Image (cartoon, helix red, strand yellow):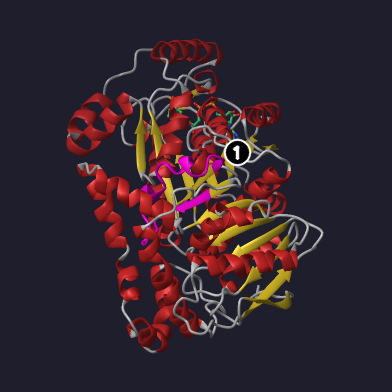
Amino acid sequence: MTVLDGARERRVRTGGVELCVAELGDPGRPTVVLVHGYPDSKEVWSEVAARLADAFHVVLYDVRGHGRSTAPSPLRGGFTLEKLTDDFLAVADAVSPDRPVHLVGHDWGSVQSWEFVTVKRTEGRIASFTSMSGPSLDHFGHWINKRLRRPTPRRVGQLLGQGAKSWYVYLLHTPVLPELAWRGPLGKRWPGILERVEKVPGSDYPTASLPSDAAHGAWLYRDNVRARLRRPREDAYAHAPVQLITPLGDAFLSERLYDGLELWAPRLTRRTLPAKHWVPRTRPDRLADWITEFVNATEDGRPGTAANGAYADRFGGQLVLVTGAGNGIGRATAFAFAEAGARVVAVDRDAEAAARTAELSRLIGAPDAWAETVDVSDEQAMEKLAARVAAEYGVVDVLVNNAGIGLSGSFFDTTPDDWRKVLDVNLWGVIHGCRLFGRQMAERGQGGHIVNTASAAAFQPSRALPAYGTSKAAVLMLSECLRAELAGQDIGVTAICPGLVNTNITSTAHFAGADAEEEKRLQRRTARLYGARNYPPEKVADAVLEAIVHNRAVVPVTPEARGAHLLSRFAPRVLRGLARVKPPL
Ligand code: NAD
């Protein structure tokens, strides 16, 4: 995709400047206006705009003094929020005279959009606002004042934290130097810095206008920041629903800035994203999905109806695929994601069970859920599944390789066929999933997460579980290796290691060396033991979501799994001793 391919352009005159406005998509559809930040031009939105253009009338404009818009003369005083609001209204009137527009802003585009959505004269012209990486200067001013007036150690820490992240704002207030730097060495180096530090993929962005965008844009700060932070408006309430997207790895803005934002924006939907500052370049798929969902919800008169389960801000709208989702831990995991508003693909070899999970997921809160009947050990079937999912639903954001089967019995009772079965499902199923869906994630280059269900048996040897334990230890090592390989691509990998969890696995587990009747007896006995232990699969599901949010590598779940994990690290001889204990049969 090249920068704004196929866009229609027009010039809009306002307040002594001429703005360059680009349009994509059908003007009959709801209008989405994308406002760029600093130091940028409208091209920062090219990837997001291309993804929105099928569904919406997408409008982008170069802020005055940026890209191919002209600059005010003189520069000083030409970039006040009042003038930027005039510009926005002129663009909105030109592109959508009869209907309010959906506003989306990044960085300074968001800072100014907060002004647009909180001043009286734009009332009725804005249908919704999606904000990313740019707070309202008024809200920021009140945020600072509150912490100065009633300082507690935590509040002072928050002030100092944000103060340290704002170093560049102080620099931009110095005269002339920023202009010299941007027109000289910094301007030349900037694309390389973005690529290295922010992981912005190299492309035809940033454009050639960068040095003058950055030099002119310094006036955005000089004309507004000090004055507004000193005297923030008291009535800066949003008159449209707001979607706040917070990148968690933003080097310039602390998440804490948005604490209490509901006071200013009562119809608020929060989203978080494990990403750095330049999300329009690094996460266009996610942003386009969230913008689409929010705009459609607002158009239907139900803004803010996004799921509100735990972690809804993080997983809402994400595509999550869970294998072995028909029962037990997989099913509970699918439900937890559904509650958080994720779109769920429930995969199981049991068609009916998968369909039930998908159906219930929709009832619980998933905006969409689908069932897929696949045996994870079947390489070709998995390849077809990966191709089908990519074509019909997109690249998965979260993959949970959970399908697994139980196998108990001594090493010499375990037949080669038993070994093959357990390794085929427990190990090869995970390998297929990681290989196929992991590759799609890596190629997309927009991050993601893979969770593999291992077991406490991965680090706890036992004479009763040689094959099962081996399969799970392999899953644990595979997860660690893959985690190392994918770390540079913002894809996390987690091995979940539950202990005894009360699921149906006990009634389907195979007991090597036992005849059919004996096997039934052993299954019943184990089921009673797991039932008495009664650790619910829902708690494992919670641990899965939490592990992703915190990008954890290895997560033992249940106290006995945590205990075994500690022993394996600090007292492995104790575990070896326990491994020799003959299971009561
Ligand atoms: P479960 O039997 O309740 O559910 C497993 C699901 O996986 C079932 O719906 C089954 O149909 C499906 N499945 C099995 N083989 C499949 C295949 N080849 N292709 C597609 N689907 C398949 O079991 P559970 O306890 O929920 O186990 C889930 C995972 O957790 C497994 O990997 C298991 O090894 C692991 N685990 C379970 C426990 C426990 O105590 N229950 C402990 C540690 C690890």
Q: Is residue 373 above or below residue 533?
A: below
Residue at 54% x, 40% y: name it: 424
Residue 150 falls in image quadrant: top left
Specify start and end residues of the magenta stretch as a single range: 244-268
Q: Is residue 410 left or right of residue 1?
A: left
Between residue 496 and residue 15, name the one nearer to us: 15
Q: Quadrant of the N terminus?
A: bottom right
Whole-percent x, y for residue 408 in the image: 44, 25
Q: Is residue 505 above or below residue 8?
A: above
> Splitting the image into 4 quarters, where does residue 465 fall?
top left
Please name the amino acid that badge 1 sits on.
Ala
Magenta span contains residue 250: yes
Question: For the C terminus, which image quadrant?
Answer: top left
The residue tagged 1 is 306
Task: Provide the secondary structure element on which disc 1 rests.
Answer: loop
Q: Residue drawn at (73%, 41%), measured in percent from left and top?
A: 300
Q: Is residue 583 left or right of residue 50?
A: left
Give the image location of residue 5, x and y in percent: 70, 75
Q: Position of residue 365 (x, y in %)?
A: 62, 32
| Image position of 447 with respect to 558: above or below | below
10 Å crowding of disc 1: few (<14), some (14-19), many (20+) = many
Residue 268 appears at what percent x and percent y?
Answer: 54, 42
| Camera sees residue 522 | yes
Q: Is residue 480 visible?
A: no
277 over 583 or under it: above or below: below
The residue drawn where x is 51% and y is 71% is 201
Q: Nearer the viewer, residue 580 or 65?
A: 65
